[in-house]
Image (cartoon, grey):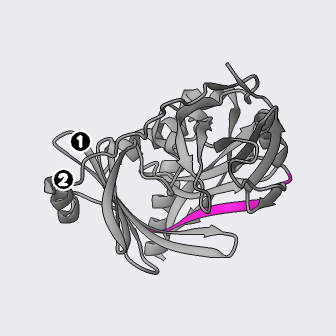
C-alpha cells in the first residue's frame, strides 16, 4: 500500500506544481527541452500501413547540439546532426550532409524553434492528462485558425517537457499520423555514441544546384504563416527534365511545389489524398504546377493556382 501511495504522489506532484501553466508555456518549455536536454527515446511512427520503430538520442558537446536517429527495421539507415549540419548514412549509397536545424522525420522542426511564430496559424489549448511510456503527460492541442491546414496534438512529459506522443488530425478528428514514445531515458551524461559522432569527420555539406536561367516564380496567395524556405531545381523520377522546386512551410505543415513548362516533364494529372499527404496539379498559363504536402487538398490546389512569374 505504501508503494502505491508513493507512486500516486510522484505522479500528482508535477501536476500540482504546474497547474496554472498556460498551453504556450508548455510548448515553450518543450522547445527548450528538445534543444538543451540529454535524453534517449525509443518511439514508433505510425503512418497508413507503415510502422517505423526509431531510436533518437540527443545531447550537447562543447555547446553544440548533437543528435542521432536510427531506423530499427529494414536496411541500416541513420542520421547524425552536429549543430546545423545533418548527415544521412544509408547502406546502399555514400553518406551526404545538408544544412538543417533538425533531423527530418521525427517531431516537427517548429517544436524546437520559436513557438510564437506558430500563433499566426494556430491556437494552443490545454487538454487532459494521461500516462504514456510509464510517465504522466500533459496534452496540448494545436488547433488551426482556418481550414487551410491540419490540427495537431502533443502530450508532453510533465517532468522534462519532452514530447511523448504527437498526432496529426484532419478537421473531423481523423488520425493521419502518429509518433508514440515507448521509452524515455533522461541521461546524466552525454552518451558515447554522440561523443564519437562529434569527433567524426563527416562529408562536406552538399552545395545547392545551379539555377542558371531559372524563372522567378512567386505566389499571389499563401495561407497565413506560410513562407518560402527554398528555391532550386529538381529532376523528377522518370523525367530527364529539370523542374523548378519551391518549399514552403508554416513550421508544422510543409508543402513542396514543382513547376515545369507544359509538356516538358511528365507530371501527375489527378488530385489524390492519402494519409495526410495530398497532391494537386494545375495548369497555369503555359506551365504545369504540382503541389504536394500534408495539408488539405483544397489548400494545395489554391496554392498551385496562385503561382505566377514575377
Evaluate if marks 1 and 2 touch, with contact meaning CB atoms under 8 Å apart: yes
In the rendering, at what x and y percent does residue 207 appear?
35, 41
From the image, tell me which residue sits under label 2.
198
In the rendering, at what x and y percent does residue 78 appear?
36, 66
Instruction: Identify the residue at horizontal 45%, vertical 52% (top origin).
Output: 162
Check if residue 182 falls in the magenta segment: yes
Residue lying farthest to the bottom in this orientation: 74
Q: Secondary structure at mark 2?
A: helix
Front-most of 177 and 294? 294
Left or right side of 274 for 178:
left
Instruction: Identify the residue at horizontal 54%, vertical 47% (top origin).
Output: 234
Q: Which residues are magenta?
A: 172-184
From the image, tell me which residue sits under label 1.
64
The answer to which of marks 1 and 2 sits earlier in the sequence is 1
| Prevailing secondary structure class for the magenta stretch in the rendered image | strand
Instruction: Identify the residue at horizontal 77%, vertical 42% (top origin).
Output: 300
In the rendering, at what x and y percent does residue 92 appear?
37, 74
Check if residue 12 falls in the magenta segment: no
- Asked if one can make out residue 184 in the rendered structure from this viewpoint, the answer is no
Amino acid at each position: 500500500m505504501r508503494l502505491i501511495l508513493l507512486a500516486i504522489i510522484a505522479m500528482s506532484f508535477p501536476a500540482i506544481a504546474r497547474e496554472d501553466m498556460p498551453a504556450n508555456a508548455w510548448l515553450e518549455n518543450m522547445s527548450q527541452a528538445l534543444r538543451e536536454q540529454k535524453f534517449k527515446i525509443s518511439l514508433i511512427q505510425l503512418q497508413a500501413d507503415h510502422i517505423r520503430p526509431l531510436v533518437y538520442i540527443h545531447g550537447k558537446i562543447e555547446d553544440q547540439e548533437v543528435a542521432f536517429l536510427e531506423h530499427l527495421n529494414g536496411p541500416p539507415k541513420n542520421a547524425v546532426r552536429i549543430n546545423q549540419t545533418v548527415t544521412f548514412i544509408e547502406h546502399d549509397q555514400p553518406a551526404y550532409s545538408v544544412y538543417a536545424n533538425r533531423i527530418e522525420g521525427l517531431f516537427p522542426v517548429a517544436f524546437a524553434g520559436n513557438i510564437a511564430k506558430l500563433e499566426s496559424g494556430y491556437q494552443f489549448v490545454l487538454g487532459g492528462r494521461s500516462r504514456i511510456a510509464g510517465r504522466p503527460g500533459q496534452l496540448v492541442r494545436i488547433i488551426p485558425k482556418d481550414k487551410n491546414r491540419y490540427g495537431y496534438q502533443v502530450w508532453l512529459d510533465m517532468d522534462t517537457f519532452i514530447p511523448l506522443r504527437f498526432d496529426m488530425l484532419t478537421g473531423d478528428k481523423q488520425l493521419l499520423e502518429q509518433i508514440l514514445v515507448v521509452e524515455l531515458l533522461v541521461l546524466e551524461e552525454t552518451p558515447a555514441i554522440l561523443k564519437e559522432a562529434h569527433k567524426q569527420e563527416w562529408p562536406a555539406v552538399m552545395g545547392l544546384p545551379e539555377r542558371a536561367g531559372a524563372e522567378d516564380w512567386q505566389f499571389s496567395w499563401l495561407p497565413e504563416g506560410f513562407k518560402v524556405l527554398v528555391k532550386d531545381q529538381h529532376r523528377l523520377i522518370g523525367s530527364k527534365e529539370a523542374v523548378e522546386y519551391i518549399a514552403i512551410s508554416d513550421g508544422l505543415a510543409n508543402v513542396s511545389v514543382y513547376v515545369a513548362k507544359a509538356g516538358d516533364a511528365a507530371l501527375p494529372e489527378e488530385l489524390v489524398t492519402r494519409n495526410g499527404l495530398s497532391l494537386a496539379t494545375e495548369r497555369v498559363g503555359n506551365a504545369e504546377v504540382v503541389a504536394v504536402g500534408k495539408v488539405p487538398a483544397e489548400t494545395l490546389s489554391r496554392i498551385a493556382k496562385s503561382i505566377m512569374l514575377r
